[in-house]
Image: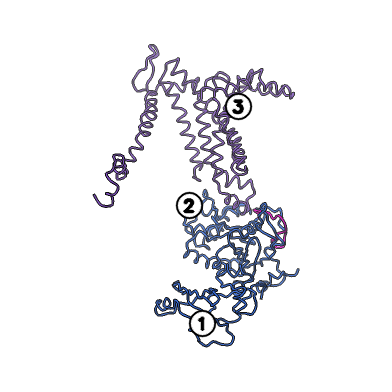
Chain colours: A purple, B blue
Amino acid sequence: MTAATASLGPPSLARRASTALYRRPVLALALLLMPPVLWLGIVYLGSLFALLVQSFFSIDPFSGLVVHSFTLATYGELFTPANLDIIIRTTVMAAVVTLTTGAIAFPIAYYMARYASPRTKALFYLGVMLPLWSSYLVRVYAWKLILAKEGILTWLFGEAGLTWLLDGILALPVVGGPSLSVSYIGTYVVFVYIWLPYMILPIEAAVERVPISMIEASGDLGAPPGATFRRVILPLAFPGVVAGSIFTFSLTLGDYIIPGIIGASKFFIGQAVYQHQGTAGNIPLAAAFSVVPILVMAGYLSLARRLGAFDAL
Amino acid sequence: MSPPRAFVGASMTQTGPVLPAVRFASVSRDFGVVKAVDDVSFEIADGEFFAMLGPSGSGKTTCLRLVAGFDQPTAGEVFILGEPVAGVPPYERDVHTVFQDYALFPHMSVADNVAYGLIFRGVAKAERRRRAGEMLEMVKLAGRADARPSQLSGGQRQRVALARALVDHPKVLLLDEPLGALDLKLREQMQVELKAIQRQVGITFVYVTHDQQEALTMADRIAVFNEGRVEQIGTPAEIYERPASAFVAGFVGTSNILSGDAAFGLTGSPEPIAIRPEKIELLAPGASVGDDRVVVEGTVAGVDFLGALVRYAVVLPGGVELSVVEQNRLGDPAQALARQGRAVRLAWQRAHARPLKGLA
């Protein structure tokens, strides 16, 4: 033992272990990463893979048992008119909900990021996050009461003398219905409400990262505010918009509770998955349905990429 | 319109009744109780290279932002080419800015960055591309038109920012410490280039800097800012040789400032005086000097070897210390260090001791 280490006395076991790890950084890294990698690799990716495998099996129409042989027949079933209807309905709803939340969230996020004082910003954060503190189910049921025929909204329209307007909206083909709580409009309103925070927060972060000097430079070079917004702020904040839209789009694609409680009792993908793996016992079809949102998201992201959404990253 | 006194130094760049490019008329800008700019009046002549020099927080950048239109004065009026610009937004001012952080748009190519301003002048796409190419040629970046700003070095980004701001020939170009982020060698090179480009395009440059060397090197005239006020305006030589205040004398170059008894002993008046270290001759005790010289005896208390220069700290009998700088023409630097502790005679021309109250 050298004089430099001798003064510390005999090293304890913990110290010896620390030194051993210090000398082998790769081992230390492996020990740190092992648990999450195992968790992600086996539990998450494993189940995803199992799902993918299941979707290539089929179900015996007579016995109701899963036939463990490779087939594309289950995917073929997705293209029956009833199932295609579900897929289109869900995707259109997700797209419309995403566009609406984006349109509502951007001004709020922009104000929070660029104009609000630190105090006001904290209040806005609280306001945006507060709904997330209560149960999602409670909020959805609250909306059922608000949108119901005997609900506060109907009453408000009546008080304002606008009953004709509500009736007009409900009389619209397809999206209308006997009352808001049993129409697609109702489903749409609640989706927009529930997912709004997931759109506001990433956009706020993205707008905040656009340097003020860049906005000033645009105006300085002759761009009126509208042009500055279109050519500088929006492109630079767009990764945040895409991040938010990934949340709202995928959450809408997979949700089965909101359309189950509020809506026209026509199936969305989430409900179809829930029903096929549960009561119907058709695991392969449920698996095939689950693959649809993954493919839609992949298509959506590659489109966003091609449109240059990530150029500013 | 009679030019204010501060403007006299620019008369050589003035030909006939040309309107000043920029005029500040009793301009103030308060941020709450802080007076960032405090009742400032001066003019910047058309086509001149004008430096606003001062320490951070002295109001020079705020003045620049008032010209750009990013900020509005709380009192007074700013004029650009004779027009009052109160309430005129930045995008309607014929003035461009080179930002300290360059503020290049990261999602656009270098050429698109340079051509950006032309979009709003209604220039067609092909013509925009051509003119951006011309500008990039001028700043020696013709080969990088399709690169992204992130692929360029700091010096190259600086040039792109300059090309972008000059592409549509603004009346005035504002530069906010544009060389601050560059290393010394590159900075010195860019100083020469900026000056050459300014001469070539003939546009009024208003250059904000805290680096007195930069201001002295490049500017036709300098305004020295301190605590929201303009301490002095003049050519680099005027500012350096005839500092109007103790602040200017200390901020632009270094000065020995003598006041009270020390000043009285030398000049017969307690008015403070400033003497540049390089104006003082270091002589052997008892060496003969001309009649026009002021002579004092002292002792070398410290010697600093600075490479090209040697700096001596000389203590006078009253305890006052003077800094004296000599060119390093010695055969052996050890000779300089050997002067430590020796008695010396200091001499300087009477005219080089500048009184600090009022302009001479």
Q: Are marks 2 and 1 in contact (CB under 8 Å)?
A: no
A143 within the magenta span:
no
Residue placed at 41% from the left, 19% from the top? Answer: A283
Identify the residue under disc 3.
A189
Q: Chain of mark 1?
A: B
- In front of the other: B130 or A164: A164
Q: Are marks 3 and 1 in contact (CB under 8 Å)?
A: no
- In front of the other: B99 or A171: B99
Magenta stretch, residue numbers = B69-83
* Depicted A1 relative to depicted A34: above or below: below
Amino acid type, callout 3: Val
Direction from residue A46 to residue B347 in the image, left or right: right
Q: Chain of mark 3?
A: A
Q: CA distance from mark 2 to mark 1?
A: 58 Å
- In front of the other: B337 or A116: B337
Identify the residue under disc 2.
B150
**What is the number of the mark on residue B345?**
1
Q: Secondary structure at mark 3?
A: helix
